[in-house]
Amino acid sequence: MTKDFESDKFTNLVVSWNKYDSMPFNEWVLEVSESYFLSGLTLKMASNFLNCQPAELQAVLNLAMLEDENLILLAKLKPPSTTWFSLAAASTDGLKAAIQALMETKDHKSPFLVVEGAIREIEGPTVFERIAGLGSEVFGHSAKKAQTYGLLTDKGIKALKGFQTRVKSGKTLTPAQMAYADGLLRELVTNGAIKRETKDGDKELCDEILDALGYE
């Protein structure tokens, strides 16, 4: 009985995820979020189950935290997955500006850059821009914390170390790298590796990350 129940919870998550094309976007986000938390799976396990990147699932979970009226706004255009993190972190005014910009944009423009630009005009520096402004030591330290806490995939840890090297050499992160870093750092926050009341002697770095991500 227990096995069947556990199996049903995992199956429900997969079924919910696969409804993306057949449901209004706001309803899909909420159903996936509910199914995920009922499944009891970690972000890494669930993303493996769904055959998606952990960052993509984390972005959906972030969107589910929006006010209902804001999430309903997104159902009008079903925004590209590359924009989900930015939209989830935006204020109501920033969200409305981003939606309007997406509806008016030309096909050849990057949806991510369109959304980031629209939010920036309303709110100032965006989450991704703040991530891009983090020092190299932040990424290196995050990689070490991921290993200490047994979090992230080998690919994710390697990516953080790569971001450390890139920033240290004076290069900026690309939009895709900013989005990936956002997902990785949020996973560390979600699982308690990075928090304000840290007991690991790294409060300054934790606060820097949390401030960049927009956490209270």
Image (cartoon, rainbow, N blue to C red):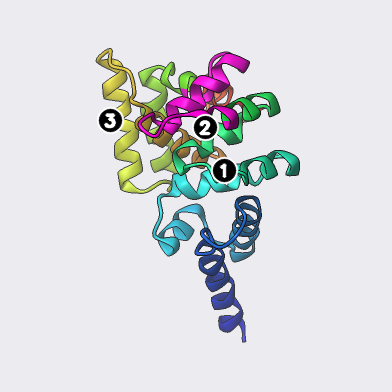
**What amino acid is at disc 2?**
Leu
Locate residue 168 relative to residue 36 in the image: left or right.
left
Q: Can you give x and y, in whole percent of width and height, for residue 95 in the image?
A: 63, 30
Q: Is residue 116 magenta?
A: yes
Q: Which residue is mark 3?
A: 162
Earlier residue among tags 3 and 1: 1
**What amino acid is at disc 3?**
Gly
Q: Can you give x and y, in whole percent of width and height, for residue 148 in the image?
A: 42, 41
Q: Can you give x and y, in whole percent of width and height, for residue 193 in the image?
A: 52, 38
**Would residue 202 be seen by someone viewing this image from the given angle?**
no
Which residue lies at the image location 50% right of the left edge and 39% below the top edge? 188
Which residue lies at the image location 46% right of the left edge and 33% below the top edge? 182
- Distance from disc 2 to disc 3, alpha carbons, whole Å, reads 31 Å
Count of numbered marks: 3
Callout 3–callout 1 Cβ contact below 8 Å? no
Give the magenta range.
99-128
Q: Is residue 106 magenta?
A: yes
Dominant SS type (magenta): helix
Q: Residue 103 is drawn in which quadrant? A: top right
Instruction: Give the quadrant of the C terminus.
Output: top right
- Vertical position of residue 124 compared to residue 181: above or below: above
**Would residue 138 be seen by someone viewing this image from the given angle?**
yes
- Distance from disc 1 to disc 2, alpha carbons, whole Å, reads 8 Å
Locate residue 205 relative to residue 72 in the image: left or right.
left
**What amino acid is at disc 1?**
Leu
Callout 1–callout 2 Cβ contact below 8 Å? yes
Instruction: Give the quadrant of the N terminus.
Output: bottom right
Q: Which residue is mark 1?
A: 77
Q: Which residue is mark 2?
A: 102
Earlier residue among tags 2 and 3: 2
Residue count near mark 3 (Cα–Cα under 10 Å), binned few <14, some 14–19, many ≥20: some
In front of the other: label 3 or label 1? 1
